[in-house]
Image (spheres, helix red, strand yellow):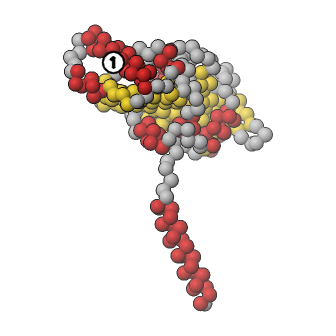
């Protein structure tokens, strides 16, 4: 009995210490879009509940699917440098998180005459649309994966969980309605900021955070340029365009407010709290709805 008692005490002690260690080293959350941000790839992640109308327009005719969505993250890799970014000639894969039971949905898709079931030598299976290059499946419970290229490649990228985007940036992205990130972009979509392709190619990275307040949207942007001089040039360019828009729309402004909105620190150009016009949001929505499906 003494031996058993000693083992139990030792086991409980180990469990307690293990629990304390686990609590002290709480793992940082990983988001699927973190694994999408390779150079010259544009990453978009959308809060599907906050931007329900946008999601519905992106997945037309799939009302039940969009109701179940919580977050949509998409990787867009251009196969050229045409500017602005076009929907054609893009390598795309995306992850939709929400209420998607794997067994029920995948079983249902097996009986669709519009789909063909595929499987590779590793036992990975998915579905392909007969009239398009789109492939998809519920990769695991509550996670719907789609691609216009190799489904197996997209699955591997999702499964590996390599955080190309750091935890701080990822937290900023997940806590806004729409976030867009690109590392060393060669092209970008037209967002109404008046950015020439030369400015895009001189960026180390660009992060756009679009927040929603009732019926309006605001932009926070963090753009790291190849040099401090280029950041200064970009600031002047964006500021001039923004002032022109305000004057055109006869919107009053204060220089002091603009100084708080546009900031420069070495090679980092920051925009804080810029109210987006309906035209800019329409351009963004057209881009997203055109790229997703």
Front one among 77 and 124: 77
Quarter-wise, where is residue 109 in the image? Answer: top right
Is the residue marked by circle 1 packed among few (<14), some (14-19), or many (20+) residues within 10 Å? some
Front one among 93 and 139: 93
- Is 260 placed left or right of 2 in the picture? left
**Could you tell me residue 293's position as x and y percent?**
56, 24
**Could you tell me residue 106's position as x and y percent?**
63, 39
**Could you tell me residue 84's position as x and y percent?**
51, 14
Q: Which residue is pictured at 44% across the width and 21% down the height?
A: 230
Mark 1 highlights which residue? Answer: 239
Residue 231 visible in this rendered orientation of the protein: yes
Quarter-wise, where is residue 75 in the image? Answer: top right
Q: Residue furthest top?
A: 248
Q: Residue furthest bottom?
A: 1
In the rendered image, the quadrant that contains the N terminus is bottom right
Q: Is residue 282 above or below residue 272?
A: above
The number of callouts visible is 1
**Could you tell me residue 27's position as x and y percent?**
50, 53
- Is 70 placed left or right of 245 in the picture? right
Secondary structure beneath label 1: helix
Q: Which residue is pictured at 71% across the width and 33% down the height?
A: 117
Q: Which residue is pictured at 57% across the width and 85% down the height?
A: 5
């Amino acid at each position: 009995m003494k031996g058993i008692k000693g083992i139990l005490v030792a086991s409980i002690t180990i469990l307690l210490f293990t629990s304390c260690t686990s609590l002290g080293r709480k793992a940082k959350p990983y988001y699927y879009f973190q694994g999408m941000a390779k150079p010259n790839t544009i990453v978009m992640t959308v809060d599907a509940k906050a931007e329900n109308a946008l999601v519905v327009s992106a997945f037309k005719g799939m009302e039940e699917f969009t109701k179940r969505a919580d977050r949509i993250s998409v990787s867009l890799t251009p196969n050229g440098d045409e500017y602005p970014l076009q929907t054609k000639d893009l390598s795309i894969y995306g992850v939709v998180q929400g209420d998607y039971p794997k067994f029920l949905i995948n079983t249902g898709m097996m009986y669709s005459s519009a789909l063909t079931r595929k499987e590779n030598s590793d036992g990975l299976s998915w579905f392909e649309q007969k009239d398009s290059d789109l492939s998809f499946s519920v990769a695991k419970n509550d996670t719907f994966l789609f691609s216009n290229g190799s489904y197996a490649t997209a699955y591997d990228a999702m499964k590996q969980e390599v955080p190309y985007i750091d935890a701080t940036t990822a937290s900023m992205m997940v806590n806004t309605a729409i976030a867009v990130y690109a590392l060393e972009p060669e092209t970008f979509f037209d967002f109404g900021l008046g950015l020439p392709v030369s400015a895009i190619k001189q960026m180390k990275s660009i992060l756009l955070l679009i927040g929603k307040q009732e019926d309006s949207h605001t932009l926070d942007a963090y753009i790291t340029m190849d040099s401090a001089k280029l950041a200064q040039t970009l600031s002047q360019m964006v500021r001039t365009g923004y002032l022109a828009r305000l004057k055109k729309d006869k919107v009053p402004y204060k220089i002091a407010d603009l100084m708080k909105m546009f900031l420069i620190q070495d090679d980092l150009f920051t925009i804080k709290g810029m109210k987006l016009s309906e035209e800019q949001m329409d351009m963004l929505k057209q881009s997203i709805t055109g790229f997703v499906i």
